[in-house]
Structures are given as structure tokens and as C-alpha cells.
């Protein structure tokens, strides 16, 4: 059976929701960040990067949200979580997911985990000070996608990009990020997400509030 290693409200929430939406049989295993379990010897055997998510499959471990999301969509085609028969549309989904992983998530990490990037309090303060601007610039672009009235990231159809955006838009409410009210269409997407039964189920499993 698939096994997903996650931490509550971490970026692993995207992969967690995708597995639930796919109707996959999987075990969800919590990694306790408060006890730095992500750097324990046992967890480093699963994922030497010391990060979540990690998905254990019968062929080995997959890490990185965009890779896990694509794997889930391809492994459970009946759930129609990605346009699998359309190379261009699939690339667009990857485009969005990789943008989140490589740019928006990293902008958040400058705020939440500055020590990853530079040593010392002055460097940390400088990163924290600039992060809200960088996060906001990314969300400006995402907000524009929804100007045509689409309900989901790629249009009328829900895909693996939607839970990934949901994680990022939940983090808008975290301390130090700034004015989430600047992005009403992104917040409307977040509201649509919490109406979905799979999302509610995963939030309950991770013991998280709706927002
Ligand atoms: N590029 C990776 C990022 C994974 C990542 O940074 N995960 C964070 C949680 S959001 C983590 O495990 N942090 C633990 C730590 O930094 O010690 C992905 O998209 O999966």
C-alpha cells in the first residue's frame, strides 16, 4: 500500500489531498516537526533530504510535490486529476506546479525558514522583510488567472494544481505574510476547496481548521 509521510499544514498537504481525491488506498504517516523527526535517522532513510512529503510506493520513494502530484494523477487516471492525454495541457499543469515549488514556496521559505539560505540574524531579518513583497508578486500573477471567472486553476476542471494552490493560499493567513485581502479570487478558490469532501477529510486527518 502507498504510504505518505506528511506534517500537518506543510506543503505535503497538497499530495495528501491529491491521494484522497484519487481514491487511493494509502497510509498517512505524520512526521513530527516539533520533535525534528524529519531529521531522525529513521526518516532520513525514507527521505535523505529530511523534508516532507515522501511517498513510499512498491517501486521506491518519490519526493517533491510536483513529482508526487503527477504520479498520483497518472496512477489513478479514472480520477481525472490531470489532462493525461493532452501533452500541452499536462505541461501547463506542470508549469504551474513547478512555479509553486520553485518560486512561491521558496518565497515563503524565506519568511518561515530563512536559516536555510543564510546565516545570522541580520540576513534572516532582511529575508523576512522582503518575503511578503515576493509572495505578493507571485499571488498577483495567480490572481490574474482567475479573472476570466474560472473556478479552478486550469479552468472548469479540478486538477492536481488546485490542492497545491490551496496549501499556498492557506499560508497567506500565517503571521507575517501580509494582507491576504489583496487576492479575493484566490481566497474564493480557497473557499471552494474547503467545500470538497476529500479536502475536509484530509483537514480532519491532519487535525487542521478549515483555514
Ligand atoms: N521542494 C519540496 C519542498 C519540501 C519542503 O520544503 N518541505 C518542508 C515542509 S513545507 C519541510 O519538510 N521542511 C522541514 C524542514 O525544513 O526541516 C517539495 O515541493 O516537495
Image: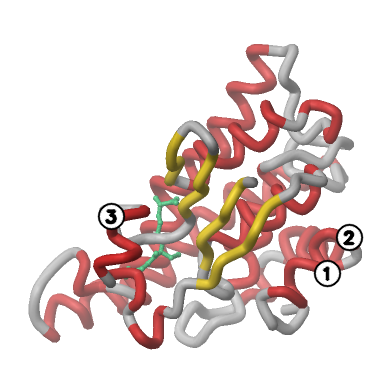
- Determine whether the beta carbon of the residue marked 3 sits less than 8 angstroms from the nearest atom of ligand 1: yes
Indicate whether 80 appears above or below 91. Answer: below
Q: Label 3, on which residue?
A: 49
Nearest the eye: 182 or 201:
201
Q: Is residue 12 left or right of residue 205?
A: left
**Callout 1: SS:** helix
Q: Label 1, on which residue?
A: 200
Q: Position of residue 122 (x, y in %)?
A: 12, 83
**Callout 3: SS:** loop
Frontmost of labels 2 and 3 is: 3
Tag 2: Cα neighbours inside 10 Å, few (<14), some, or many (≥20)? few
Nearest the eye: 111 or 30:
30
Q: Is residue 86 left or right of residue 124?
A: right
Residue at 61 percent across and 80 percent down: it is 173
Please tell me in which quadrant of the rendered image residue 111 appears: bottom left
Q: Is residue 124 left or right of residue 67?
A: left
Q: Label 2, on which residue?
A: 196
Tag 1: Cα neighbours inside 10 Å, few (<14), some, or many (≥20)? some
Q: Position of residue 53 (x, y in %)?
A: 48, 56
Residue at 54 percent across and 31 percent down: it is 95
Number of labels in the image equals: 3
Real-space Cα separation, disc 1 to disc 2, in angstroms = 6 Å
Residue at 76 percent across and 53 percent down: it is 20
Q: Quadrant of ligand 1?
A: bottom left
Check contact, mark 1 vs mark 2: CB within 8 A: yes
Q: Is residue 36 left or right of residue 119?
A: right
Check contact, mark 2 vs mark 3: CB within 8 A: no
Q: Position of residue 28 (x, y in %)?
A: 62, 63
- Determine whether the beta carbon of the residue marked 2 sits less than 8 angstroms from the nearest atom of ligand 1: no
Residue at 54 percent across and 60 percent down: it is 12
Real-space Cα separation, disc 1 to disc 3, in angstroms = 29 Å
Which image quarter holds the C terminus?
bottom right
Amino acid at each position: 500500500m502507498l504510504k505518505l509521510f506528511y506534517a500537518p499544514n506543510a506543503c505535503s498537504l497538497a499530495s495528501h489531498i491529491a491521494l484522497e481525491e484519487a481514491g487511493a488506498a494509502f497510509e498517512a504517516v505524520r512526521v513530527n516537526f516539533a520533535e525534528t523527526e524529519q531529521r531522525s535517522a529513521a526518516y532520513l532513510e525514507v527521505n535523505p533530504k529530511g523534508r516532507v512529503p515522501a511517498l513510499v510506493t512498491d517501486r521506491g520513494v518519490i519526493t517533491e510535490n510536483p513529482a508526487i502530484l503527477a504520479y498520483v494523477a497518472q496512477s489513478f487516471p479514472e480520477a481525472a486529476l490531470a489532462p493525461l492525454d493532452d501533452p500541452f495541457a499536462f505541461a501547463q499543469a506542470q508549469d504551474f506546479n513547478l512555479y509553486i515549488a520553485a518560486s512561491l514556496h521558496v518565497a515563503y521559505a524565506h519568511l518561515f525558514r530563512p536559516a536555510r539560505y543564510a546565516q545570522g540574524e541580520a540576513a534572516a531579518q532582511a529575508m523576512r522583510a522582503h518575503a511578503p513583497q515576493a509572495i505578493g508578486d507571485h499571488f498577483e500573477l495567480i490572481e490574474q488567472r482567475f479573472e476570466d471567472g474560472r473556478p479552478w486553476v486550469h479552468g472548469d476542471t479540478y486538477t492536481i494544481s488546485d490542492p497545491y494552490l490551496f496549501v499556498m493560499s492557506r499560508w497567506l493567513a500565517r503571521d507575517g505574510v501580509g494582507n491576504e485581502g489583496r487576492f479575493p479570487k484566490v481566497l474564493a478558490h480557497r473557499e471552494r476547496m474547503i467545500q470538497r469532501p476529500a479536502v475536509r477529510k484530509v483537514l480532519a486527518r491532519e487535525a487542521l481548521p478549515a483555514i
